[in-house]
Amino acid sequence: MVSLDNVRTGWHLFSRLPWFLRHPLTADVAERVLRRRLQTRTAMFLHNARVIYQESRHPARTLLLQAGCTYADLERMVRSSGLEETLQTLFRRGVYLTVGEFKGREATERSGRALNVQPALLLNPVSAFHIPAGSSGSRGASTLAPIDLAFISGCAVDTCLWLAARGGGEWVKALWETPRGGGLFRLLKYASFGRPPRGWFSQIQTTRQELQARYRWSMHAVGWASRLAGRRLPAPAYAPLDDPLPLARWLAGIVRSGETVHLFTFPSSAVRLAGAAQDAGIELAGVRFLLGGEPVTAARLQAIRATGADGVSRYGTIETGPIGYGCLAPDAPDDVHLLDDLHALIQVAPQEARPGLPPGALLVTSLHARAPFLFLNVSMGDQAVVDRRRCGCPAEEIGWTTHLRGIRSFEKLTTGGMTLLDTDVIRVLEDVLPSRFGGAPTDYQLLEEDGADGQPRLRLLVHPLVGPVDSRHLADAFLAALGATAGSHLTRWYRLGWFTVERQIPRVTGSGKILHLVGRPPA
């Protein structure tokens, strides 16, 4: 049954998209916009702060007032101390949200007073609802993030300039991701500058069973509106993770014609594509991946580059949009330049860590006036190394001088009195096991489930393509690599049958990602 909300959203998008598509951004305009944004960051922040103070139910307003900070106080602080120093001061006074608090998974309390916090309370009232988007739900329940076309245009400024800095102003643009909110966001962002994207491939079929109605309606609205605008956009073609050869052949065909392809996808998808291309003898030299949505590691980049292709990291979330684009002279596989014209970012110091915010945790503040959420010191559950350094790459010349690297989720799997950190699991699954038993970095996955008796169980999934493997030897290697505490705990689980090694294809999320560690779905 078609809901009225889905029809309304599709019509809202369809009615505004032709004008959006007929007025693509130029590099000169993008450069002027970025320069102005970097010069007016304080004014952008104060504009959003005024909106927060006007929203009686916004959690940041409550936190600011509890901290004794009126709008006039905030303005004085920013103008005297600077934006980031002000945000640090506010954090010390309790003005922040952990990722669990933001998503409503944990109670929010400051100075003994409880706050009502749900994602919907942080939505930007100025932002229009053109694209329905939701987080992947890989770390819990999905969060709805309505996207405004004006925000897409704002993000396109950074994408246009970064891609030009990479030498890709005239490259063929393509995507390999599901036609949900993130895919629609990226398709329209790429369509808003230069030539429209030439290819859109999806890891899932766009049928009623696999794709929610709101995304199908938006997908159709984009197709109809692009034809009306005379800038036709591609419909998603099915290219599943277990058979990406049609995409590999499409890419190889474009490369043979003398063109270079810029392809956005998830790192695990790129690894699967690279492996299939190698097995089929297909060269991917001339393909330039932009990798986001999952950790970008040395092992994954090595697998991608073995085909002649190259990959660069991108960091962001559906709630924030892009936060960083890859450094072109990186210090680490996931080294990115912070897009500080769109966001202000501070970091939790070791002496200021607190529950839900370990040392190095990142806190994000929205600067764009049409951002889907009005964030003020909100954690997305990630931590990183942050530094300002001269790298000499073209992205630095744009004006982005702050770097993030070692970006990882600090949310951990805690089960049966044992804690497994994402960083430890990545090292073992991507480096230790493939080097000893073969296979690619995406061929191993740790899955948590509850048994029929309620006892939590862990299953180490090993892709059948890895070949003959002694399960006991593999389990021993996994346990030894995890270290003394977790390894000893899991050894007992192994004897009790609560930890097993199974020859199965690793699970793929609804958005097409292959996660290293899959926890139980939220209750």
Image: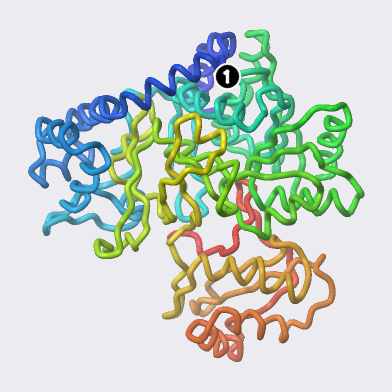
Q: Quadrant of residue 462?
A: bottom right
| Color style of the picture | rainbow
Who's the residue at 56% across and 38% down the image? 393
Q: Against 101, is 262 above or below?
A: above
Who's the residue at 29% across and 26% down the image? 44
Mark 1: few, some, or many residues within 10 Å (few <14, many ≥20)?
A: many
x then y, percent, for residue 403: 46, 46
Q: Against 437, is 284 above or below?
A: above
Who's the residue at 85% across and 48% down the image? 277
Does the image show residue 13? yes
Relative to 466, is 456 on the left or the right?
A: left
Which of these two is toward me, 299 or 125? 299
> Which amino acid, by three-letter code, is at mark 1?
Ser
Outermost residue toward the left in this view: 68
Residue under numbered circle 1 = 192
Q: Against 484, is 7 above or below?
A: above
Does the image show residue 120? no
Quarter of the image where the N terminus is located: top right
Relative to 167, is 378 on the left or the right?
A: left
x then y, percent, for residue 12: 48, 17
Circle 1 sits in a helix, a strand or a loop, which is it? loop
x then y, percent, for residue 13: 52, 19
